[in-house]
């Protein structure tokens, strides 16, 4: 899968917002049929999203994904059957209980790709992996048998709070996430890395506070996440910048690689007063690989 730094939610029933989203800097739009669309406007949203997908077949700069309603509702299959004619790049699956849901969606997509004469397996999946209480106990299922369509995982703190009966998901003094939500974040990250899919940072709900958003993105990136979901168009630029290595980081990574290449056979090397070993070399290579993917994305 092509790297995606910023995923911008766009209400599926707003033609104006859909068109504005196409001009946004987000690497991907998530055309939303779930939380941002009322039950009364589901049919309108499905038709509008399908038409938008068909009208925008060129996805080289910006991918077009669709968030459907949860699989355990009567809305999910109508969502899928309506939008697959537009060949979305992927489906965002909310309120997942376990990997079984991802594999069930895989089966649905195979049938619908066949119906629409699409390449089998071309529609990818992003799992919103922590929005139900049960999901915190089933991350091991992703390690056992998971669809190749799954290319990214993110976690959800808002719906999880409701599922756990919590009145809030943050500590009243520090403002940091409380323990259950930190556990959800850690489990999502470690599982994504274990199965080699992209771990995506959670939404930052205060869309006016771009400075704190930037800090939150950098915290996510240091933890190992790649990219973040945006709920407002103004957040995309901040997210893209935060998840793009700086020139200083790139220069340092190249120096790390160079010093190891100049000293073959050594497992530990000093550089600028710091002792470096194999994990530092791997991090440097990962950083340059990330930058190469970003440069390819922006061409």
Image (cartoon, grey):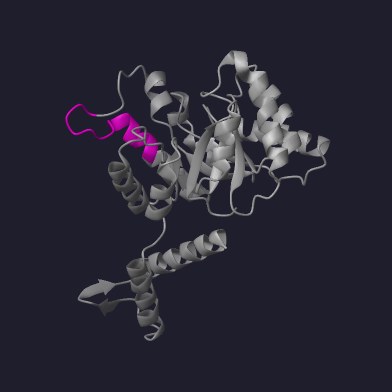
Compared with 121, 282 (above or below) is below
Residue 130 drawn at (x, y percent): 45, 31
Which residue is depicted at the point 39% across and 19% down? 162
Compared with 271, 200 (above or below) is above
Which residue is depicted at the point 71% across and 35% down? 109
Is any part of residue 181 visible from this angle?
yes
Compared with 109, 159 (above or below) is above
Residue placed farthest to the top in the image?
40
Q: Quadrant where the C terminus lies? A: bottom right
- The number of callouts visible is 0
Q: Which residues are magenta?
A: 171-185
Q: Quadrant of residue 254?
A: bottom left
**Horizontal relation, residue 120 to residue 187: left or right:** right
Q: Quadrant of residue 177?
A: top left
- Asked if residue 175 lies in the magenta stretch, the reply is yes
Q: Nearer the viewer, residue 102 or 214?
A: 214
Residue placed farthest to the bottom in the image?
262
Residue 107 drawn at (x, y percent): 71, 34
Which residue is depicted at the point 28% across and 42% down? 212
**Horizontal relation, residue 225 to residue 118: left or right:** left
Which residue is depicted at the point 36% across and 73% down? 251
Q: Nearer the viewer, residue 9 or 21?
A: 21
Is any part of residue 141 visible from this angle?
no
- Asked if residue 179 lies in the magenta stretch, the reply is yes
Residue 166 drawn at (x, y percent): 32, 19
Q: Nearer the viewer, residue 208 or 195?
A: 208
């Amino acid at each position: 899968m092509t790297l995606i730094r910023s995923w911008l939610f766009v209400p599926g029933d707003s033609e104006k917002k859909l068109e504005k989203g196409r001009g946004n800097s987000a690497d991907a739009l998530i055309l939303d049929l779930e939380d941002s669309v009322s039950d009364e406007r589901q049919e309108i949203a499905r038709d509008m999203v399908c038409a938008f997908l068909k009208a925008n077949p060129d996805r080289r700069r910006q991918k077009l994904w669709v968030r459907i309603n949860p699989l355990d509702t009567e809305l999910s299959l109508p969502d899928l059957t309506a939008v697959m004619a537009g060949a979305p790049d992927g489906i965002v699956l909310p309120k997942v209980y376990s990997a079984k849901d991802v594999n069930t969606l895989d089966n649905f997509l195979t049938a619908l790709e066949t119906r629409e004469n699409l390449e089998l397996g071309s529609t990818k999946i992003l799992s919103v992996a922590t929005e139900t209480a049960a999901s915190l106990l089933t991350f091991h299922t992703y390690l056992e048998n998971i669809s190749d369509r799954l290319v990214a995982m993110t976690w959800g703190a808002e719906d999880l709070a409701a599922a756990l009966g919590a009145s809030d998901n943050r500590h009243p003094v520090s403002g940091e996430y409380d323990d259950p939500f930190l556990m959800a974040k850690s489990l999502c990250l470690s599982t994504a890395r274990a199965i080699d899919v992209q771990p995506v940072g959670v939404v930052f709900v205060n869309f006016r506070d771009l400075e704190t958003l930037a800090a939150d993105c950098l915290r996510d990136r240091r933890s190992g996440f790649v990219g973040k979901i945006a709920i407002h168009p103004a957040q995309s630029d901040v997210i893209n910048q935060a998840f793009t290595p700086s020139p200083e980081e790139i220069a340092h990574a190249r120096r790390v690689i160079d010093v190891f290449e100049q000293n073959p056979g050594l497992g530990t090397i000093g550089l600028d007063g710091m002792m470096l070993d194999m994990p530092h070399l791997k991090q440097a290579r990962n950083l340059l690989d990330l930058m190469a993917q970003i440069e390819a994305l922006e061409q």
